[in-house]
Amino acid sequence: DIVDYYRDLIRLGEKSAAMKEPGVPALPAFNNIFAARINGVYKKNKLRVLEAHTWPGVICQPYVFGKGKVDWSGADDLRGKLDALLRERRGGGLNVTRIARVYDGACIYLLKPDRLRYWLRSIALRDADETLADLAEQGF
């Protein structure tokens, strides 16, 4: 990732491939690394990758420990709320971009902007480490 993307991201910023390319094609590699890292700790009740849901500008990637699935009915009604949650414009040209991890029972949802930068393999390692810390703190 450093050679392929970060060098240009630092140099070119918003004009870099990591900020211009969509993240959906990177999801399989991201998910393999994220799930493998989590399953290295939770070996008995493994984390499964579920099908992602996308809105313009946002990807929601769900995971579940054990069996389960996500009911996406009514999901399009969330679009405006998610966009407001993940992107905030402040005065002076400052934009704040957030990512969200939502824990709901045995499910974990990663909500992030749809740009490649947020779905790189190196980010999967960071997200997995932060998720493991959250799960440990919750006593899971």
Image (spheres, rainbow, N blue to C red):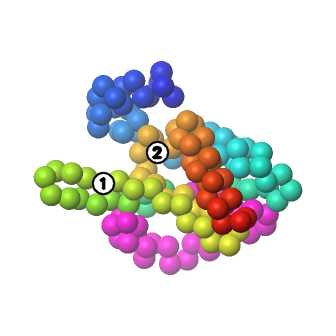
Side (left or right) of 44 relative to 131: right
- Residue 100 locus on image (x, y percent): 48, 60
Determine the secondary structure under disc 2: helix
Residue 6: mark: none
Q: Which residue is drawn at 33% across and 67% down?
A: 84
- Tell me the quarter of the picture where residue 124 sits: top right
Q: Where is residue 98 in the image (x, y as percent from the top left)?
A: 39, 56
Q: Which residues lie in the magenta part?
A: 60-85
The location of residue 119, given as percent across then percent down, is: 51, 44
Packing grade of label 2 (10 A; few <14, some 14-19, many >=20) is many
Relative to 80, does residue 53 appear above or below in the rendering? above
Give the residue displayed 32% in from the left and 59% down from the top.
87
Q: Which residue is drawn at 74% across and 56% down?
A: 47
Placement of 34 over or under 53, stated as above or below: above
Q: Are marks 1 and 2 in contact (CB under 8 Å)?
A: no
Three-letter amino acid code at disc 1?
A: Val
**At 71% across and 49% down in the image, what residue appears?**
38
Residue 62 appears in the picture as rendered: no
- Tag of residue 118: 2
> SS of the residue at dot 1?
strand
Work out which residue is located at the far left of the displayed protein and give it. Answer: 92
Residue nearest the observer in this picture, 31 or 76: 31
Q: How far apart are labels 1 and 2 at the CA level?
A: 14 Å
Residue at the top extreme?
3
Q: Could you tell me which quadrant the C terminus lies in? A: bottom right
Inspect the magenta stretch and tell me whether residue 72 lies in it. yes
Q: Residue 55's quadrant in the figure? A: bottom left
Q: Residue 96 carries which label?
A: 1
Q: Which kind of residue does numbered mark 2 sit on?
A: Tyr
Where residue 37 appears, x then y in whole percent?
70, 44
User: For this view, does 28 lie left or right of residue 77?
Assistant: right
Dot 1 alpha-carbon crowd within 10 angstroms: few under 14, some 14 to 19, many 20 or more: few
